[in-house]
Amino acid sequence: MPTITSLSPTSGPTTGGTSVTITGTGFGGPTTVRFGSTATTFTLDSATQITAVAPAGSVGTVQVTVTNSGGTSNGLPYTYVAVPALNSITPNQGSTAGGTTVTLNGSGFTGATAVTFGSTPATSFTVVSDTQITAVTPAGTGIVPVTVTGPGGTSGAVPYTYVVVPTITSISPTSGPTAGGNSVIITGTGFTGPLTVRFGSTATLFTINSPTQITAVAPAGSGTVQVTVTGSGGTSNGVAYTYAAVPTLTSIAPSTGPVTGGTTVVLTGTNLTGATAVTFGATPATSFTVNSATQITAVAPAGTGTVSVKVTTPGGISNGVAYTYVAVPTLTTVVPNTGPAAGGTTVILTGTNLTGATAVTFGATPATSFTVNSATQITAVAPAGTGTVSVTVTTPGGTS
């Protein structure tokens, strides 16, 4: 009587056709090989080995037996496994760099041995159930067929599309007002197809200028956020964008200076970091230095009258503080124009633009005292001196 000690393989597809090696003893004489009740074709390799072709069968396990004139052998189990059926893949597209986690839906996934994207195996996969597999896509390009292979065979294919993930190389400017509304140029690659531009988690309006440039409108926000572009291939890297508070000015010192300009003034306020402009009316400062978030030193340009001084930063334009251009004073008479060498003579200086006088000098010697009576008159007390000296008046507008 024949005996069977092993089968290899012990499973195969329901469509049959698998070569199964049967090992045992007593395989001589007229022989019949059955899978369950179904006889099949075979080759008698030797008295201890038969190569049989598994017939078609139903999902489940049957007993393989060998019968000859001595009787029927013991049976060993052979399992018919369904051919995997792949119905869908979600998402059905992802980055050319791979790394996208996808879900395969179908049936017959138990015991799956391979998931392939085109000719490339998935980076990894997990059989969740007989109807679901999660897989990580390998790198690839174009549209590729995805298949699942198991003991029952290889499934039909469903398409998966590799698409380019956008990348950002730079944005300009990198900061702006908390109120938003300013235009930001985003430079990079892969700016094609349906896109979403976000500042942090906030999506915003934008225009695709080319596959390498987008003009976006910054939404309102605060602090520093990451700017990203999301396309069908995924989401780009993020680039930092900082929301800057609107600057404010509280004071300017001094608040007056000559019409010729050149006066160094100190502007005090808040949120002055990153200042891009200081203006005196419509005229830019000759130069300026941002000392801190609360102070700027600027050199006044030439001008006339009273103007509004403002500071511009990425956060916007500050309120204005007043700066007055003062004309150079002039002197027309000094009465009396003589006095004792001991000083003490009270003289009347007449001229123009004398308001705000800070000094009256007789030669190199300051007046003992002086009073500004009006824009055209000063009363001063002459200091001690000798000879003939030049009397001058100094105001914020200069020296007469």
Image (cartoon, rainbow, N blue to C red):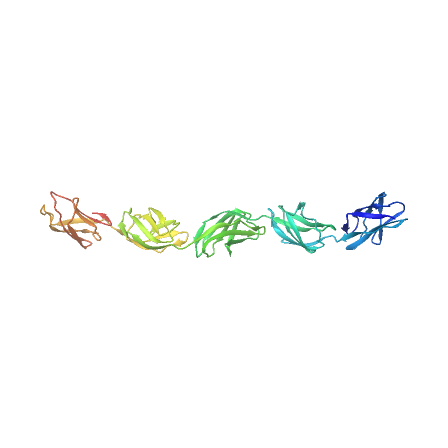
Q: Residue furthest left?
A: 340
Query: How many marks overall?
Result: 0
Asked whether residue 360 is in view, the answer is yes
Q: Nearer the viewer, residue 263 or 41?
A: 41
Q: Nearer the viewer, residue 360 or 217?
A: 360
Q: Residue furthest right?
A: 69
Residue 356 in picture, x, y percent from top left: 22, 53
Q: Nearer the viewer, residue 365 or 258?
A: 365
Q: Nearer the viewer, residue 116 or 323?
A: 116
Quarter of image, res 372: bottom left
**Left or right of residue 223, residue 256 in this image:** left
Residue 200 in picture, x, y percent from top left: 50, 54
What residue is shown at x 17% (from left), y 54% (from top)? 371
Residue 192 in picture, x, y percent from top left: 56, 50
Residue 331 in picture, x, y percent from top left: 18, 49
**Left or right of residue 293, residue 11 in this image:** right
**Left or right of residue 298, residue 66 in this image:** right
Q: In the rendered image of this protein, does residue 170 appear above or below residue 222?
A: above
Quarter of image, res 29: top right
Asked whether residue 14 is in view, the answer is no
